[in-house]
């Protein structure tokens, strides 16, 4: 495992993406997102994505210079076309439009299409929560190209991972943030497990013969993921598919549906903050179960870890570091010694 300063990783990431075809502006936006995820310890959406994104550009799947186009379809309702660019860029733009609209509207909504990988979607719902809103992001539309998830009771894929993220203002500037695939895992986590050579928890995948497996290689050899929580994950995944395929059409990878609700329309901020702190402090006060040091709410643990890693540095798996070094050398880039 490599450890390096987050600022060094950011500088390297920007130059890496530019060398493989991204514009300066897009490289900065994407690397901001990836390094923030590594700080939070969400490795599946961190530096490991750099070489995947480079390959997308080399293969012509995504345009690293593309700029999203935003059309206001009605007051507070936007359609964002990413022009076959990175979803991280387009969803950031959509989030900015919703925040701008919510200054005068009680609610705002955006559909996002024409985009590739969007990274950690909780980042966008959290950005809305930071502005005093209830933020939601729903992903789907990939059932034709990525039928990787079996529906409840089935053993062949018909859904994609169809993630959902929701966030509300929490305590001390840390949002309560729920961000999850409607499948039993996220594709990035399976790829990370494969690269690290570790087994999966039981109940996540079936092999190509429909048998349960804990070997990530079995998934990539014709296997499928299971839905999260059985019928519940299947139902939510199907709702996402109708929102993002039925409503927005064929995707580049996934389409996205985003909503923001200004909480102050229904509740005085001071009252909300008081009741929220009352509840979340009760959560923190719950005695931890065996194997846990404390009880935190979703988003709180990641915020604490980010504060620690801003000082101690972020970690990069040895296999991922080796791949990044290999690809950086192909472009004659300066390589931080921490990756070597």
Image (tube, rainbow, N blue to C red):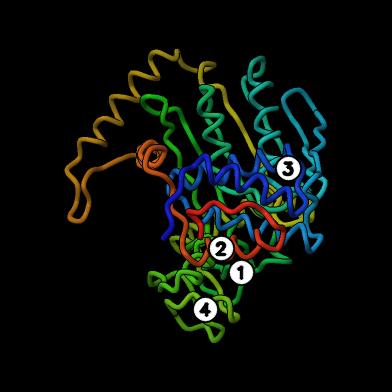
Q: Name the N-terminal-most of marks 2 and 4.
A: 2
Residue 112, numbered circle: 3
- Up the image or down, 162 lies above or below 127; here it is below
- Dot 2 corresponds to which residue? 187
Where is residue 215? Give x, y as percent: 45, 78
* Residue behind mark 1: 148
Which of the marked residues, 4 or 1, is nearer the chain's N terminus?
1
* Gap in angstroms between the C-alphas marked 2 and 3: 21 Å
Mark 1 element type: loop
Between disc 2 and disc 3, whose residue precedes?
A: 3
In the rendering, at what x and y percent does residue 157 appear? 61, 72
Q: Cα distance, mark 4 to mark 3?
A: 32 Å
Q: Could you give the CA–CA distance between mark 4 and mark 1, rounded to whole angstroms?
A: 14 Å
Q: Nearer the viewer, residue 3 or 166?
A: 3
Q: Is residue 248 visible?
A: no
| Cβ–Cβ under 8 Å for marks 2 and 1 | yes
Q: In the drawing, does residue 270 fall left or right of residue 23?
A: left
- Local packing at callout 2 (Cα closer than 10 Å; few below 14, some 14-19, many 20+) is some
Which residue: 61% across, 48% down? 13
- Residue assigned mark 4: 217
Residues at marks 3 and 1, CA–CA distance in whole angstroms: 22 Å
Please report whichever mark, 2 or 1, sits nearer to the chain's N-terminal start. Answer: 1
Out of 321 and 79, give the one closest to the viewer. 321
Q: Earlier in the sequence, mark 3 or mark 1?
A: 3
> Relative to residue 170, is residue 337 drawn left or right?
right
């Amino acid at each position: 495992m490599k450890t390096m300063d987050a600022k060094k990783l950011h500088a390297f990431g920007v130059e890496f993406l530019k060398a493989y075809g991204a514009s300066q502006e897009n490289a900065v936006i994407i690397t901001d997102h990836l390094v923030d995820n590594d700080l939070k310890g969400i490795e599946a959406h961190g530096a490991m994505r750099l070489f995947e994104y480079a390959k997308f550009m080399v293969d012509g799947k995504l345009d690293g210079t593309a700029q999203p186009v935003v059309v206001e379809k009605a007051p507070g309702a936007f359609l964002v076309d990413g022009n076959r660019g990175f979803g991280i860029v387009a969803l950031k733009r959509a989030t900015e439009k919703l925040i701008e609209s919510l200054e005068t509207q009680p609610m705002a909504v955006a559909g996002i299409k024409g985009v590739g990988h969007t990274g950690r979607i909780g980042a966008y719902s959290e950005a809305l929560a930071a502005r005093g809103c209830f933020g939601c992001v729903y992903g789907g539309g990939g059932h034709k190209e990525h039928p990787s998830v079996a529906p409840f009771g089935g053993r062949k894929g018909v859904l994609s991972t169809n993630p959902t993220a929701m966030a509300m203002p929490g305590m001390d500037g840390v949002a309560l943030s729920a961000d999850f695939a409607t499948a039993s895992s996220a594709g990035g986590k399976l790829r990370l497990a494969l690269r690290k050579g570790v087994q999966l928890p039981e109940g996540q995948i079936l092999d190509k013969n429909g048998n349960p497996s804990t070997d990530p290689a079995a998934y990539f050899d014709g296997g499928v993921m299971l839905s999260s929580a059985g019928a519940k994950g299947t139902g939510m995944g199907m709702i996402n598919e109708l929102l993002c395929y039925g409503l927005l059409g064929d995707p580049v990878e996934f389409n996205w549906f985003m909503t923001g609700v200004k909480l102050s329309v229904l509740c005085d901020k001071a009252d909300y903050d008081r009741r929220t702190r009352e509840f979340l402090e009760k959560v923190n006060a719950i005695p931890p179960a065996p194997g846990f040091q404390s009880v935190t709410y979703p988003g709180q643990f990641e915020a604490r870890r980010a504060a620690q890693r801003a000082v101690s540095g972020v970690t990069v798996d040895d296999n991922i570091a080796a791949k990044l070094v290999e690809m950086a050398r192909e472009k004659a880039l300066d390589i931080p010694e921490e990756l070597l």
